[in-house]
Image (cartoon, rainbow, N blue to C red):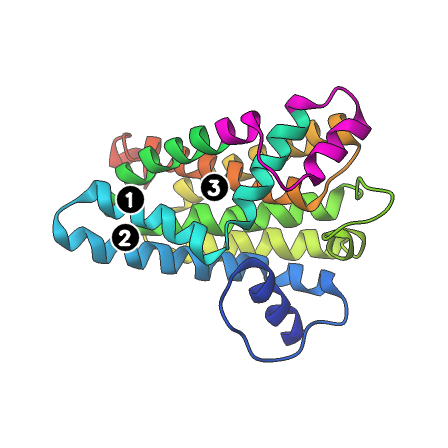
Amino acid sequence: MMRGLVTALRTLTLLPVPGREAERFSDSLYWFALVGLLIGALQATLAWAALFFGWPELAAALGLLSGIVLTRGLHADGLADLADGFFGGRSREARLRIMKDPSVGSFGAIALVVVNLFKWICLLELVRNRAFGLMVAGVMLARMAQVLLASTLPYARADGGTATAFVEGAGRFHLLVAFVSGAALLLLLPGCSPVRSGALMIAALFSALFTGLISYRKIGGVTGDVLGACSEVTETVVWLVAALLLKLPPAILQ
């Protein structure tokens, strides 16, 4: 099982991790929520430290950029490829071919700008309210959402791809562990009351469901790019809901 953690850390981050890879890559899915928690904690710590300069805009930007650096831009690349393929291809085959192209087209560039702009706006609100636990929640739930899609949808490419080993080995138990671990870790985060946690979990599930349905309709399943895009979209949606929750009277969220 610990080899799964090594694989999860090496897959989702650029952190140097000693140890041997898991024999089955799908074993790493058990650890995705925990690794997401770690990534989010590092992002939140950097944003918190930057806030000492009294510049919340900079703190939000550093929190956002550190996430891109820590993940090597892996999920951002998936979002760009998905946008290019889904909006630029007229058939399933064309979409898959475009998504495999490493270059970024106009749809991908637009998606990256829009999503990261929304992320920064939401993070700015979270930073101003010192809601760093909610910031971590978005990152953690985004990784949980990847497991939900990998466990419920088939791999879309007949010839396989980089995420084949993760998706084809995933099953209901991975889904259960991801959901339970995500919910448990969420309740441990500062500022995540049961009401807030429930709202954020619903937001993450809705985002994953929305991404999965579109992907199934467009290409008949998921790919590594879809999983990455799901992470980006879920992170944005959860942060948006978290920022909106901060606008509500505190008595409602107890």
Tell me the residue that label 2 is attached to.
47
Residue 95 falls left or right of residue 72: right
Q: Amino acid at mark 2?
A: Ala
Tell which circle, 3 or 1, labels the residue nearer the N-terminal end. Answer: 1
Tell which circle, 2 or 3, labels the residue nearer the N-terminal end. Answer: 2
Quadrant containing the N terminus is bottom right
Q: Amino acid at mark 3?
A: Glu
Q: Amino acid at mark 1?
A: Ala
**Gap in angstroms between the C-alphas marked 3 and 1:** 14 Å
Secondary structure predominantly adopted by residues drawn in magenta: helix
Q: In the displayed image of the protein, which residue is found farthest to the bottom?
A: 19
- The answer to whether mark 2 and mark 1 are in CB contact below 8 A is yes
Q: x, y percentage for residue 230? A: 59, 39
**Is residue 250 something that shows in the picture?**
yes
- The answer to whether mark 2 and mark 3 are in CB contact below 8 A is no
Tell me the residue that label 1 is attached to.
60
Q: Which mark is residue 235?
A: 3
Quadrant in which residue 223 is drawn: top right
- Relative to 101, residue 17 above or below: below
**Gap in angstroms between the C-alphas marked 2 and 1:** 6 Å
- Relative to 183, residue 240 above or below: above
Q: Residue 225 versus residue 35: which sits nearer the camera?
A: 225
Q: Nearer the viewer, mark 3 or mark 1?
A: 1
User: SS at mark 3?
Assistant: helix
- Relative to 246, residue 71 above or below: below
**Residue at point 44% right, 50% down?**
68
Span highlighted in magenta in the image: 87-111
